[in-house]
Image: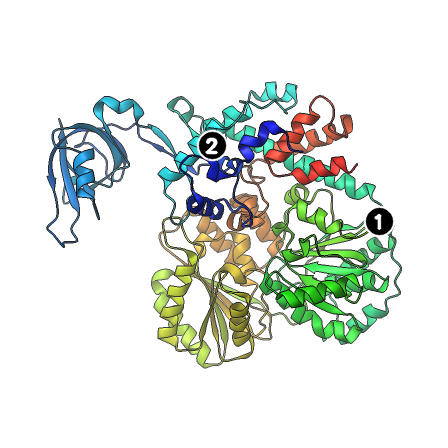
Amino acid sequence: MRPSSLDPLFAPVSSLPGVGSRLAVRLASLLGTDPEREPHVIDLLMHMPSGIIDRRLRPGIARAPEGAIVTLEVRIDRHQAPPRASRAPYRIFGHDDSGEIAFVFFHANSSWLEKSMPVGADLIVSGRVEWFNGRPQMVHPDHVVPADEADTLPLVEPVYPLTQGLSGKVLQKAIAAGLERVPDLPEWLDAAHGKRANWPSFREALTALHRPDEARLAEHGEDSAALARLSYDEFLANQLALALVRRSLRQTRGIGRKFDGVLKAKILAALPYSLTNGQAQAVTEIEEDLASPIRMLRLLQGDVGAGKTVVGLLAAAAAIESGAQTVLMAPTEILARQHHASLAPLCEAAGIRLAILTGRDGARHKRETRAALEAGEIDLLVGTHALFQSEIAFANLGLAIVDEQHRFGVHQRLMLASKGQGVDMLVMTATPIPRTLVLTYFGDMEVSRLTEKPAGRQPITTVAVPLDRMDEVVERLRVALQEGKKAYWVCPLVEESEKSDLAAAEERHAVLTQLLGPRVALVHGRQSSDEKDAAMRAFKDGPVQLLVATTVIEVGVDVPEASIIVIEHAERFGLSQLHQLRGRVGRGKEASTCLLLYKTPIGETARARLSIMRETNDGFLIAEEDLRLRGEGEILGTRQSGTPGFRIADAGTQADLLETARDDARLVLETEPALDGKRGPHLKMLLYLFGRDEAVRLLRAG
């Protein structure tokens, strides 16, 4: 049971004043929480500011620098409303001792402006100044308050990442209401460590980051005590949960599985190529794990196109031969269907009974598949998160294979493992992960690495091209398509101020269809599975030669004929994600090209990223560089997909805090293994706060 003192933080966000059901939906999309439930107050409070606006600059009108945010004390002189039916803005003129300024409002409500900025009033106005034709103006000021209420103006204001339809003011108001709910919680930090670090309490740290004041402004940033405190809390919750999971997996005995390799031989005979040395080595390691009575917990890392799926199938063959069932879980429906399609001929050759189950399957298909699974009539089940559902039962689950692990939390790993006796687990990822992050996310998992590409894979030439040469790129594409080639066009991750990535993709699709004709199709995350499948099929087998897509194609989409990929606004992507996307080509017999379109001028980090992409195809090298440049969120895809990563902490820049948290977690479990001593009950609160409550259940399960 969650401690009742945490109830105010686990209330739904709609319980906050001013947050209705529509706003709650927008917050869920912003916070990346489970779409099945409304976000909690604590989810909102864990949404950290990305920067600060400093409104302390008061230079006077005439000395206000171009583009700066300033605070002015002005007297309002006159209003200039636009003529009826005109699109001109509404202007209000004011002055101070140094000069005159225009406040500009588009689509204005004139009666509201007359009331809030009346002629003759002395006001404090804050916002960004622009100089237009030698005259200063401020478009849509951020704050307008009467001069005698100057103390109500926030001089230092946090800025938050936003989502479409949600303004900064509305979000700040909701967060302010949430902060009022934070109780004084008992301290879970080790006393000596807390004293040495001189950190604020959990509540003080949250307040300091969401309500920065002038005194704290100097220390706000990566080194601030408040940020370090909350990052450490998150690392500690993560490491404690991992340590509890590891202990639980070690305590439950595995099963030494017996198999003779007959199915393996049939699969190898049906393969059109022989295994690489890396694949053969990984299969040997997995078979040794399966034969041992200790539960397998192995991470299979292979770069894009290194042939992990075949290794997974050979692992499944050993488990199936021993009389057990295997489940293969993929993070998206596209990928699950693709796995099913690529495994089907090999399973048929080996006599393995294969089935697929996803969230969008019809009720009848689901019912029949579940019945067959429970009766032991299915050997290998492929599917998505739908497989977590409690009503899905196996006759004898022996091996769980999880593809793209970073999209699955510790919770899901445990739920899967609980669907059978001594379930062995193989985790596959195409994201090469640096050693520090392997420890952070997977604990002391055994690791197999596939470093070579299967024979016949072609090199990929990578070129960076500025966006203003887009016409040339389209022309080159036209020629390539006339020669019968196939290509991807990936639309950008969208910056906060813009429309959605879906709108960007639809617009690009319309333009390219106009220029290149009907051989262009569109695929994006909000299509139904049937629409996605139809577009992918038309691209793979049919008339479509150019597939315009959002980043849904990032993981695992396999069309060997595609030999060109264009990535628009490449400067907005992380290195590992660019590398994942590039891996969609170079899978067939033809030499392939990756075109990175970037917007000039380009920042230092983005420039470094693009040059690394041009220089190397080695995913492991790229992952190390990505950690150096950007931190763990990019590498594990968590920043974009809102999946189980860190919301506050960053393993890339705060590795020292992570190391300390790991040692602290180990020490806690040595001194009070049931978390029932002096710190234990408080640490359970920490696990709940950071969504690691599955680990608390493990304690109860013994």
Q: How far across and how far down the image is residue 158, in percent?
A: 40, 34
Type of the residue with mark 1: Gly
Could you tell me which secondary element the residue under label 2 belongs to?
helix
Res 549 label: none
Work out how far the residue at label 1 is from the one at label 2, CA to CA, in angstroms. 45 Å
The residue sitting at 86% across, 66% down in the picture is 261
- Taking depth in this image into account, of 11 and 430 the one nearest to the observer is 11
Please report whichever mark, 1 or 2, sits nearer to the chain's N-terminal start: 2
The residue sitting at 74% across, 23% down in the picture is 677
| Residue hosting label 1 | 254
Q: How far across and how far down the image is residue 467, in percent?
A: 37, 61
Q: Is residue 153 left or right of residue 35?
A: left
The residue sitting at 76% across, 30% down in the picture is 674
Nearer mark to the viewer, of 1 and 2: 2
Q: Badge 2: few (under 14), some or many (20 or more) residues near its Cα, within 10 Å? A: many
Q: How far across and how far down the image is residue 37, in percent?
A: 55, 46
